[in-house]
Image (cartoon, helix red, strand yellow):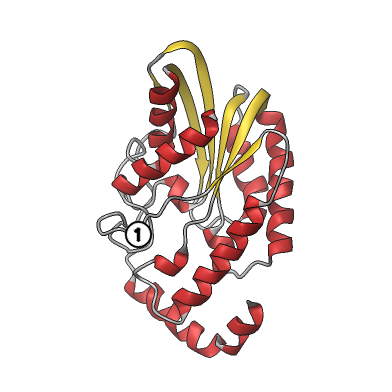
Amino acid sequence: MRVAALALAPVLLVQGTGVRRRTPVLPEAAGPRSGVVPGGGPPLVAAVLGESPAAGVGVATQDEALAGRFAAALAARSGREVRWRLSARTGTTAAQATPRLVPGLAGPPADVVLVVLGVNDTLRLRSRAAWLGDVGALLDALRPLTAPGGVTVLAGLPDMGRFPTLPQPLRGVLGRQARDLDAALARLTRPGVRNAPAPPLDRPGLFAEDGFHPGAVACRIWADVLARVALG
């Protein structure tokens, strides 16, 4: 993968610069980064950590974003009240997540922890071994924040080979890199850790206006898949 990227480096550099110039920079979603979704039974505590999709880039408010939708889907599927909190920042890699985001999840031990990372590691052409090492270190850091018997859900990477804003050959290179990292993530096995492959999110109307981030409908679809995996 890296050999191909090196061979195409001059073209990829020009295309990447052009994409950044043309693509609108969207803000992270507005609104509180914690909340309660009503329900019965004992409360379910959920914590969400991640990069720009987790931060809500591409939608207006956190209620429409992945974290809010995930909490709502957990409540709908379990029938329980869900108390959720979010720590997310645009541009974060797996290596940066431990020092940058884990402290923001301080609070009651979480029954469900959702991790949404990988796009920025894809953009940096992170090797599979380094990526898995970074994710493993993050999982170690999240363990004290997880309730006994709790689960951690690793959101699978979206196929960047389907992002409409990316031209070829950049799209093909990043698509293959994302699939490589996603396959490595799917093979990671730890007690209490579950992998949730990303659903297809490339239909018309599912991308935000930048052609790169999931829009509100895509967040709802993705959140439902993640909640289904979290609740087993």
The percent position of residue 178, horizontal first and vertical second, equals: 55, 64
Residue drawn where x is 37% and y is 55% of the image: 201
The percent position of residue 186, horizontal first and vertical second, equals: 63, 51
Q: How dense is the environment of label 1, judged by Cα within 10 Å: few (below 14), some, or many (20 and up)? A: some
Query: On the picture, is 5 further left or further right than 81?
Result: right
The quadrant of the picture occupied by the C terminus is top right
Type of amino acid under label 1: Asp
Residue drawn where x is 38% and y is 57% of the image: 213
Q: Is residue 2 above or below residue 116?
A: below
Q: Is residue 82 above or below residue 87?
A: above
Query: On the picture, is 118 further left or further right than 212?
Result: right
Residue drawn where x is 32% and y is 57% of the image: 207
Q: Secondary structure at mark 1?
A: loop
Query: On the picture, is 76 further left or further right than 116?
Result: left
Q: Which residue is mark 1?
A: 202
The percent position of residue 96, horizontal first and vertical second, equals: 64, 53
The percent position of residue 76, horizontal first and vertical second, equals: 38, 24
Q: Which residue is at the far left?
A: 205
Q: Is residue 9 above or below residue 53?
A: below
Residue drawn where x is 39% and y is 78% of the image: 167
Query: On the picture, is 107 further left or further right than 204?
Result: right
Comparing 190 with 121, the one in front is 190
Q: Which residue is at the far top?
A: 41
